[in-house]
Image: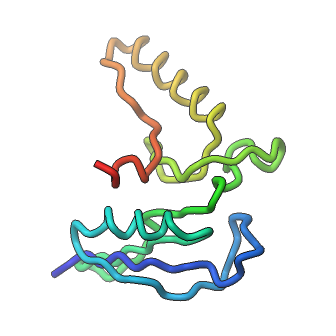
Amino acid sequence: MSWTYEVLVCAAPDNHDNSCDLWTPGDTFFDYGFRDAFKAAATQAHAIVRTVSPHNGKTRTAFHHIEGGGLCEWCGPATGRRGPWMRTPAEERFMCEPCVTDAQNSMDALHKANGWPRSRSYWPVLEKAEK
């Protein structure tokens, strides 16, 4: 049983908000090939990587790339700021730098108040793929 990572490339190159719905299949990677799948998606103007669980067949978006960053899912509609696909304590989402800084500062304050060690809670998903 293998994890499958399928790269899907946006078929509407002029529409790069966060709601594209026309995709063309790209390469498919397996298991630890997720790093290569993320890197392949990052070379496109707009692409996603969908993963399929070998256990239950469910799919989810493991990586989302928009050249120049996606509209920040916290403040973007009001500010127009953009940022990379970020891993957060709860989920992955597009976040701009000011929102990442504010969120990380809040997590640091929470950890300090509870006597927990500081940990980096927000980072770009692609950063993990490059290691």
Q: Is residue 70 above or below residue 29?
A: above
Q: Is residue 77 above or below residue 40?
A: above
Toward the front, the furthest residue is 43
Image quarter (top left, top right, bottom left or bottom right) of the N terminus: bottom left
Toward the right, the furthest residue is 78
Does 83 sit left or right of 77 as displayed?
A: left
**Residue drawn where x is 45% and y is 71% of the image:** 49
Q: Is residue 44 above or below residue 110?
A: below
Instruction: State how many labels appear.
Output: 0
**Residue drawn where x is 66% and y is 54% of the image:** 68
Does 35 sit left or right of 113 as displayed?
A: left
Q: Position of residue 73 (x, y in %)?
A: 67, 50
**Residue drawn where x is 62% and y is 35% of the image:** 97
Q: Position of residue 27 (x, y in %)?
A: 39, 83
- Tell me where residue 17 sits by quadrant: bottom right
**Residue drawn where x is 45% and y is 40% of the image:** 123
Q: Position of residue 62 (x, y in %)?
A: 43, 64
Q: Position of residue 99 (x, y in %)?
A: 64, 34
